[in-house]
Image: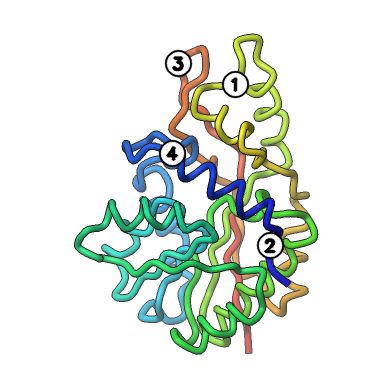
Amino acid sequence: MSVTSRYREAWEGFWREASDEEGAVFWDAAPDLTAGRHLTLFEAHLAEPGLPMVDLGCGNGTQTRFLADHFTRVVGADLSAAALDHARRADPAGQAAYRLFDAVEKTEAETLHAELGDANIYMRGVLHQAEPDDRQLMVNGIATLVGERGRVFLVELSESAKPVLVGLAQSPAGPPPKLAPIFRHGIAPGEVADAAVPEYLRAAGLTVLASGELPLITTEYGPDGARIELPSKWVVAGRTA
């Protein structure tokens, strides 16, 4: 099974239209506000830091390039070829490798694992964007990539993020400029119950090793001039002996 063509085309359309300008994409905050903060939490739980690091749902590769400064082998993987075009343009030195990848497709996960071996996975704000029926399949794919020795750091919007997003979308002035394209392309964020994420991981054979809360920082600002931050939860998971 793979993601629906509608879902794939929605992302292709979004990334084809997106600017290469730094900070132009709603969730594409600088790494010191995103992956940098996450890495301080993740590193303590890496059983083998030398394993390849996969930035799953890498988009234009902002966080991937940051991870490539800290790990020997980093792969940015995304469903959208247009997103990977952005990522490669922004990484002319080839700090990381980039790969078109459908995490819902079991064979693709098995193929990538065969190439990389066990890997550590970083995934920020991807699961809620997936179709509900695809979420367990996506986490199963992550479990395949993690194998026996890897770990996954998964950041997902909390349930309490929904009213924040709804409020922004229904603002009398319309949604903020950077949020509008997301809705226009039909990839408006879905809702993942807070309790569902650990269950997806357990069903895939992974054990939750640590968890906590940390806002998902965006590049957009509200009418009051404050940066928009969305409530989110993080989880570290892997296989245990």
The structure's colour scheme is: rainbow
In the displayed orientation, state which residue is furthest to the top.
Answer: 172
CA gap, disc 3 and disc 2: 37 Å
Picture coordinates of residue 85, whole percent (x, y): 37, 55
* Residue type of the residue flagged with mark 4: Ala
Which quarter shows the N terminus? bottom right
* Residue nearest the observer in this picture, 120 or 175: 175
Q: Are marks 4 and 3 in contact (CB under 8 Å)?
A: no
In the rendered view, tell whether residue 219 sits above or below residue 55.
above
Residue at the disc numbered 1: 175
Which quarter shows the C terminus? bottom right
CA gap, disc 1 and disc 2: 27 Å
CA gap, disc 4 and disc 2: 22 Å
* Residue type of the residue flagged with mark 3: Gly
CA gap, disc 1 and disc 3: 15 Å
Q: Are marks 3 and 2 in contact (CB under 8 Å)?
A: no
Kind of element beneath mark 2: loop
Q: Earlier in the sequence, mark 4 or mark 3?
A: 4
Which mark identifies residue 127?
none
